[in-house]
Amino acid sequence: MPRLSARAHTLQESAIRKLDLTVAKQKDVSFYRLNIGQPDVLTPQPMLDAIRSYQPKVIAYGPASGTAACRAAAAAYSSRWSPGLSAEHVVVTAGGSEGLLFAFTAICDAGDEILVPEPYYTNYNGFGTVAGARVVPIRTRIEDGFAIPSDADLDRMVTPKTRAIVLNTPGNPTGVVYSRAEIGRVLNWAKKHDLFVISDEVYRQIWFGEPPASALEFPEHSERVVVIDSLSKTWSACGARIGFLISRNGELMEKIERLGQARLGPQPLAQEMAIAAMNLPESYYDDLRAIWRGRVLALYGSLQELGLQAPKPEGAFYLMVKLPVTDSEAFARYLVTDFRDRGESLVVAPGPGFYADPSDGRDQVRLAAVLEESKLVRAAELLGKALKAYGSR
Ligand SMILES: Cc1ncc(COP(=O)(O)O)c(C=O)c1O
């Protein structure tokens, strides 16, 4: 057998996808699927219209960093947070995922370290593995609302190999929104150690209290800030595979452009959708927030009624919930393979998938509020019944 790379062997299997394979094998059961962040909110009509009116004679390659029109539209949209952004500050990527991969790759040499507050979006591990970088978790705790530790605590995590810190606000899986002051603090701290700050803001338009600040809002730190945005969640277009890497650091953007050249350009059709998205009126975002606020608060309220601990999400559409179990992976499997109530059950994402060390988060699960409110209330009812049944086995 020819040998595969050590890197290939260290790629993590997604715990969420693994559970999905078991779900697919179940017969005669209807599942409330709260395990993945795939919204069922309709993609805005102008984006669908853009597909219909795309009638090229040849489906040609587009420019490596995205079409001029798409970059300009994304820059104009993002200027809400950083006035004066222009096309040169934006590279169009295949989803936020590729933007993160490009950022990790451009910033890190083999063995370099990227600090990430945990629990965190699982795929950061995969981007780290592919880029040859090590994701180093910064422990935050459900009990204190997943707050970022003090500067002194952060200082202790820095080594000569540390190159960047990732912020994800609003956060997946925590629902945390960092205040403007908090982002400013982290930026000042990063300056002290000369680190990049990669701010994953793919949920920036989905918030329930104060609007989230963006790392783009700090011109004094613009050379160390890289922001990731995406069409997936805000515009309900996960399958379009369009994201944006935004930075005012010219040297970094030149290297990102080269990474883009190595894989040729992002899809032109999907970029037409993105242009339509960027031109939606402000009321679109108000309506979107009303949908997500209703859902997230319905699920949060139902969990409160069950007496379960979950920090109240301030944005995004996930809840990290503490359960009275010692192995949330076993409990998640039990939901899929054993528990049924009137032919129904639910699928949850086990907590360990969001921690660097899989022995952490074993009493937690992540729920994605991706269904209509009434379905979320029923899903929470199922969770309560399942916990009772599981405890008394
Ligand atoms: C925090 C976070 N960042 C990035 C992504 C990547 O999304 P996409 O590649 O679809 O833009 C996701 C997807 O769930 C996410 O939750």
Image: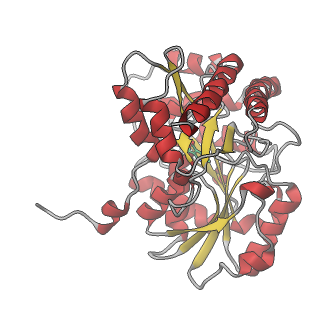
Asked whether, in this view, residue 69 is left or right of residue 51, the answer is right
Q: Position of residue 209 (x, y in %)?
A: 87, 39
Q: Is residue 268 visible?
A: no
Q: Is residue 292 above or below residue 106?
A: above
Q: Nearer the viewer, residue 201 or 377?
A: 377
Farthest bottom residue? 160
Give the number of callouts.
0
Of residues 367 and 45, the one nearer the viewer is: 367
Q: Say above or below: 126 vs 170.
A: below
Write down which quadrant ligand 1 falls in.
top right
Vertical order, 229 against 288 (above or below): below
**Can you give x and y, in whole percent of width and height, for residue 220 in the image?**
83, 67
User: Where does the image place residue 115, in percent across and percent down from the top left?
Assistant: 62, 68
Instruction: Report the residue that reaches farthest toward the left.
Output: 1
Say left or right for 235 vs 312.
left
Q: Quadrant of the N terminus?
A: bottom left
Residue at the image point whose x is 79% and y is 42% from the top: 312
Closer to us: 229 or 49: 229
Quarter where residue 136 is shown: bottom right
At a point 59% along the width and 23% down the height, the residue shown is 40
